[in-house]
Amino acid sequence: MAALRRGREERLEQDARLGRRMAQALEERRASSVRGGPGEVAWRLYDTYGFPVDLTSLMGEERGLKIDMDAYEAARKQAQLISQGGGKGVDDQINLDVHAIADLQGRGVPPTDDSPKYDYSATSADPDSVYEFGTCQGRVVALRCDKQFVQEVPSGRECGVLLDRTSMYAEQGGQIWDEGYMTKEGDEETEFTVKNVQVRGGYVLHIGSLAGTLRVGDTLNVFIDQERRKQVMNNHTGTHVLNFALRRVLTSEADQRGSLVAPDRLRFDFTSNSAMKSDQVKQCEQIANDLISRNGEVFAKESPLALAKSIQGLRAVFDETYPDPVRIVSIGVPVEDLQADPSGPAATQTSVEFCGGTHLRRAGHIGPFVIASEEAIAKGIRRIVALTGPEATKALHRSAALENQLNVLSEQLNDPQLSSKELVRRIVELTDEISQATIQQWKKDQLRAELTKMKKQLDDKDKARKAAVMTSVVEETKAFVTANKELPWIVRRLEAYSNTKALDAALKQVKAIAPQMSALFLSVDEDAGKIVCLSAVSKAAGTNVTAAEACLEAARQHARTTLGQDSQPVEVQVPTASNAGPVASLQDCQTLQGKCQVFLQVSGRIHSRAQLRSGTVLPPRATRARCSGRIAAGYSGLSLPVTEAPAPDAVPLGRRPTLRTADGALIWDAAAAALHLAPAQLRGGADPASEAAVLAALFQADELRQLVAGWLAAGAPAQQSAASRQAVVHWLERLDAVLRDRTYLVGERVTLADLALCCALLPAFTGGLDGRQRARLVCVTRWFRTVVHQPPAAAVLGEVKLRE
């Protein structure tokens, strides 16, 4: 309670300082001859404290002033640029480089004392214990702006502050930096907002923005963002627990390769030859929660490096260089006990690691632990993202809600009022929702497996229903035709719904029982809104070839009666196989290498859904989806001009894009052009198996391109678009599984297989799949980004922006 009161008092005092600073800024502006109000101060108040600009404007109006909104907008845009660039635009001017470090050392400035970062304690051993952080003061030993050290920094500037002593943690060892603020001793109106903390050569540099004037020699009171630090400590201690659990589940395979400790999550990279199975992920999560539930004390102590390395079971990062002495962090076992018996089994039963980060005082303070994902990031390297504390609690609640939805859906399977089509739609929607949710990875796999089982049950019922319909239709037709063998024709309605196979089977019964009979069968599916009609004419009745024109005229007359006036179709001349040249073989392509003249681009256009709604058309760059040939040319050092497509009768079989060689010959189709232009490396090298795999991928790319076009094409019927989308997503899910353990599709480098499939998928990534859908296809998205950023690909495709 004392800590809560103290926090409330600090917030009240902060609000009071905020009001005083705003009033002071307004008074200074009114007293000056400058027209307008302090726009940059208004932005800083909003950016730092959430103080709305309209309220700031009202305060200004009370004093006869108007906020300079141009200055406000300029400050806002500058802050956005800094945010988008990760602070690099400012950091380059502020961060310490080798020259700055040499300058400090030359002036005898000692390294920063950052030991106060460990000055905190837990009020109890309870899992929900409050943490209290000690106070810290530091003297300004250096100020840095514009790549140089200065003696003074005026208000409103971004700068770096170097103190002799600080309690803020600088980014290192995978742990993110602290945030917070500093106030000037004796002048609390001067405040420095800390946005980043970096350490170079032992010097801890605080990077942020200043309100008020700061000089070298000033004393600052340091205040860290305690809630943020607590969550970071949660996840850092959770990272150690996860490392221990992985060692138990995967034995010696799981060597650490990197980590990130942030307030909202932890990320852990490790070696593994294969993906973790769902039960392994669950076991790992259970071991972690078991260690947390023991609520062991977290011990930290420095030790001679040689002695520390002799402790059996102690974990260290591969190839990492550690200081001497090195800091040991142990959960549940005092470091002194480990030092006293380094070859004993104690360190193998808990988490013991080298670490200089900030940790909780007890493991139980971590709270619930959840593994949200496990995936590949490179060959032989896996990545786990896990959650602790409040974020893990949210994930558990979300998991329970989704499981409840699945149980409700399971009960609905037996509801006669719900059609099979509606149940399948609900299953697909819930599957998408679960795939995009942040919950336990093993639970996600479990729920999706249950939904797959439900879908199979519905599919089995649907197959059984269709089989029953076919049997019924066939038996009915068989009985009717047997009783009416002498009839020359029959026209009947059968209850086959939209089962065309059943109607076809009925026609086969007619042919078998009464060969001289002609038949027309019609079926209605009211749920699907379809009418299906199949007919067959007997051999005797179908030989009057002179009646073809009469048949066409009868059809036209029926169309006039039912559909209105005659339409005027445009007749199109389609090239026939008789004037088509031979298809270029791989050997021909190799012979013609380097003798190309021009690349004749496809004339079609691809539209995104947003553009279909607004009625606009994509620019010619939309044809990038068919540019694998031009990219292949880039790998061969060829730069081909691109022109409009030739006349249809000049392109064999109408296949585009087309490649025209220097001697005037044409090589048509994207796959053939790409094979002709590509160097041996892109075609799979000298390995026949790799070459065959590349050729197979080229055929698949053409099929996939048609599916993507069917999904996103202008004017496509909604049902066709949905079917094409489902086919593309299913195709991508299979590709994602293939790419889990490999970087490229064939071999260890880019081939035409990657280029062709990437180009075919380009419209899907830029105009179809949004961020949530791509989150389910991590491996495919990683592969796609890797390929389109290859220099020859980027030179043709330009900047590829994924749909948000």
Image (tube, rainbow, N blue to C red):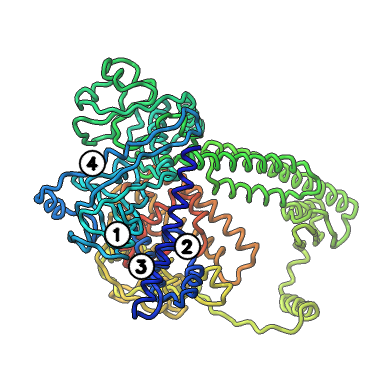
In three-dimensional space, the C-alpha distance between marks 4 and 2, rounded to whole angstroms, equals 35 Å
Distance between mark 1 and mark 4 Cα atoms: 26 Å
Q: Nearer the viewer, residue 680 or 246?
A: 246
Q: Earlier in the sequence, mark 4 or mark 3?
A: 3
User: Residue drawn 51% across and 41% down?
Assistant: 390
Looking at the rendered structure, the number of numbered marks drawn on it comes to 4
Which of the two marks, 1 or 3, is nearer to us in this view? 3
Q: CA distance from mark 1 to mark 3?
A: 12 Å
Residue under the image location 47 percent in, 52 percent down: 12
Nearer-N-terminus badge (1/3): 3
Amino acid on which disc 2 is placed: Phe
Q: Position of residue 558 (x, y in %)?
A: 79, 77
Query: Does the CB distance between marks 4 and 3 fall below 8 Å?
Result: no
The disc placed on residue 113 is: 4
Crowding near pointer 1: few (<14 within 10 Å), some, many (20+)? some
| Image point (33%, 21%), residue name | 334
Please state which amino acid type lies under the numbered disc 3: Gln
Q: CA distance from mark 4 to mark 3?
A: 33 Å
Q: SS class of the residue under badge 4?
A: loop
Tag 1 secondary structure: helix
Q: Which mark is residue 88?
A: 1
Q: Is residue 144 above or below residue 407?
A: below
Disc 1 or 2, which lies upstream in sequence? 2
Asked whether residue 261 appears in the rendered view, the answer is yes
Where residue 93 appears, as percent x and y from the top left, is 23, 61
